[in-house]
Image (cartoon, helix red, strand yellow):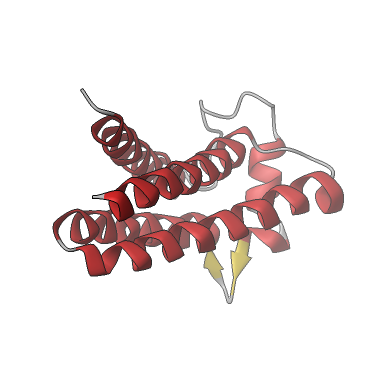
Amino acid sequence: MNKKKILVGTVFFLIIMEIFFTAFLVISSGQNSVLCFLGSSCKEIQSSPYGQIFGIKLSQMGLVSFIILLGLFFLASKNSRYKFWFLLAGLLGTLFALYFIFVQIFILGKLCSECMIIDISAIIIFILSLFMFRFALRN
């Protein structure tokens, strides 16, 4: 199996995993989650003023964003002109993830394990997408 297929499969798996994690957050909103292994910090962070933008919960925005990313992934795999848009979406996701990690560590002083899993996965998706993009330019 070549490197490109492994990268594509890994990115696909991570996007699907992100959709399930964020869907779980949307469904379990306001409840104690089994995925929160850092204690009550998850609920506190998700219900903080930083847990929503324009009155919309970040978990809901994340779910929509990852579904869009999955759509762009499929489009990019079929048509090379969408690879730029997929990479751009990955970059935006990474910038938001870095911002949310910054907020948790330096502003709120607490960590949400669920949020960290999602944010770190978004960063990994972007890094792997860069390699996918590089391989796509060669072919």
Q: Nearer the viewer, residue 125 or 83?
A: 83
Q: Nearer the viewer, residue 122 or 85?
A: 85
- Residue at 84% in and 53% down: 107
The tally of labels here is: 0
Q: Nearer the viewer, residue 11 or 29?
A: 11
Where residue 90 sits, quadrant-wise, is bottom left
User: Is residue 130 shown left or right of residue 113?
Assistant: left
Q: Is residue 126 above or below residue 121?
A: below
- Residue at 31% in and 62% down: 83
- Residue at 66% in and 38% down: 112
Q: Quadrant of the N terminus?
A: top left
User: Is residue 10 shown left or right of residue 112?
Assistant: left
Q: Residue furthest bottom?
A: 54
> Residue 36 appears at what percent x and percent y?
59, 29
Q: Is residue 41 above or below residue 137?
A: above
User: Is residue 46 shown left or right of residue 83?
Assistant: right
> Residue 76 appears at what percent x and percent y?
24, 59
Q: Residue furthest front?
A: 138
> Residue 61 appears at what percent x and percent y?
46, 63
> Residue 54 appears at what percent x and percent y?
58, 77
- Residue at 45% in and 49% down: 130
Q: Is residue 12 above or below residue 78?
A: above
Where residue 99 sits, quadrant-wise, is bottom right
